[in-house]
Amino acid sequence: MTGQVRTVDGRVAGRRGQATRQKLLDCLGEMLSSSPYRDVKVIDVARKAGTSPATFYQYFPDVEGAVLELAEEMAKEGAGLTELVSGRSWVGKAAWQTSEELVDGFLDFWRRHDAILRVVDLGAAEGDKRFYKIRMKILNSVTNSLTDAVKELQAKGKVDKEVSAAAMAGSLVAMLASVAGHQKGFTTWGVKQAELKPNLALLVHLGITGKKPVR
Amino acid sequence: MTGQVRTVDGRVAGRRGQATRQKLLDCLGEMLSSSPYRDVKVIDVARKAGTSPATFYQYFPDVEGAVLELAEEMAKEGAGLTELVSGRSWVGKAAWQTSEELVDGFLDFWRRHDAILRVVDLGAAEGDKRFYKIRMKILNSVTNSLTDAVKELQAKGKVDKEVSAAAMAGSLVAMLASVAGHQKGFTTWGVKQAELKPNLALLVHLGITGKKPVR
DNA sequence: ACTTGTCCTGTCATGCCGTCAGCTTACCGA
DNA sequence: TCGGTAAGCTGACGGCATGACAGGACAAGT
């Protein structure tokens, strides 16, 4: 289904080609971490990878195209975030643990990929469907699981029927994503990581179960 | 305090100068709404304003500098967001109304300024202190008020002492900002505005008071 | 009309973008 | 071993954005 990796002009990439392609992607990732997105130039990425701009254009249509590729890679790993929610219990003490682990896992993932996620976020906010799709792919893995959790609790009568499961899950995940994206900001401002996490977990718990946690 | 408006080379701008400067800012704002940040070029802004690139550089060091100016303008208006929280009641039915109005006001403000806020968000996430400061200026007006509200409730013994007021307020505001930034995304996906707002209000209420709302 | 200071633009050097033709390298079958 | 073929890379080029400057246009006061 994925087919082979192809160059822009249609050739199939061999071993060597894939290597340089990957090197370009790696260097692009580094550049994104170290300088503003607006200032990342093809020529810099190429230089950093020890090759020429022309080579870059052989594998990617432009910087944006390469970023999409990078984001795609990350999204695959992001699918694993589902496991932070699915199959977990949202009752009693276990619910608190579930909340904490979800927050932990989420913040960690975001911290590891903050540079690319920033750009994906921007692209999605600007209305670019390709970026939006990738963002969804990552967030949905968690959102859907959370939505199911809420619906299940509703079925048992433990949560008000009025609550829209999807909206609630979506809002919580958006919160996590946003806070994760500005983690550095929070700490610079004076809120410590140590008190940030429990509060996020508390909000998640409140949002899903509608009750204060039992610790 | 603000002093006079000055050109890059130090001259004070007169009436006519201020007009073209403002026109450039307006056009920049439009461009930001209609095309990706990365693709906004000085020459396009200048053309749209019916002037030349050289004129642009007389008033702003670069695109980023002009965006900062635009953001500064918006931040002034954003200070008014405080009134959505300060002096409101967080007890009983009134608390629900306060929550709803806060969400309403916030989403509305964000929708009106989404293009610039996107860029400010990006700049802040990338670690640019100037953008970060502006973001804080806007969010703090709400965050501080919310923090006070939580502390007050804590003093009355209505909210657990363990809760970090600042972290809670910060997380809620981050959530609002994030959801606001992806409003279009939510609707495209299938969550309607009508069910999004009550759920956000519910989360705000839960976060601040720790209780389910009385409607 | 002349001066003064503000305001705008033509022009130019510089540097990045994106493309192409052409060169080198690796692989493969005869 | 020897082409043949496709993959892989780059130098070079026209085109366009950037950013600096000097000089011209304009308004207001004298």
Image (tube, coloured by chain):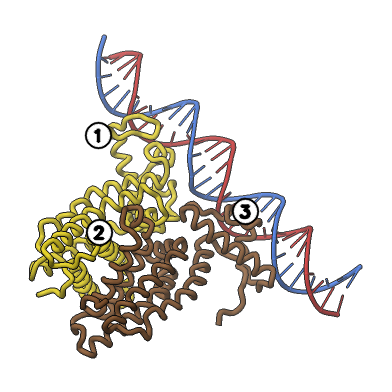
Chain colours: A yellow, B brown, C blue, D red
Q: Which residue lies furthest to the bottom in this view?
A: B156
Residue A19 position in % (x across, y down):
29, 39
Tag 1, which chain? A
Q: Is residue B71 visible?
A: yes
> At 67% from the left edge and 68% from the top edge, which residue is drawn?
B17
Q: How crowded is mark 3: few (under 14 residues within 10 Å), some or many (20 or more)?
A: few
Q: Three-letter amino acid code at disc 1? A: Met
Marks 3 and 1 on same chain: no
Q: In the rendered image of this protein, does residue B144 appear above or below residue B188?
A: below
Camera-near label (1 vs 2) is 2
Tag 3, which chain? B
Q: For numbered disc 2, what is the local secondary structure? A: helix
Q: In which quarter of the image is residue B139?
A: bottom left
Q: Quadrant of residue B50?
A: bottom right
Q: Residues within 10 Å of mark 1 (few under 14, many from 20)?
A: few
Q: Can residue A111 be seen in this view?
A: no
Residue B71 position in % (x across, y down):
48, 68
Camera-near label (3 vs 2) is 2
Instruction: State left or right for residue B142 relative to residue A74.
Output: right
Residue nearest the observer in this picture, A79 or B198: B198
Q: Quadrant of residue B160?
A: bottom left
Mark 2 lies on residue: A166
Marks 3 and 2 on same chain: no
Mark 3 lies on residue: B47
> At 53% from the left edge and 64% from the top edge, which residue is drawn?
B66
Residue B2 position in % (x across, y down):
56, 79
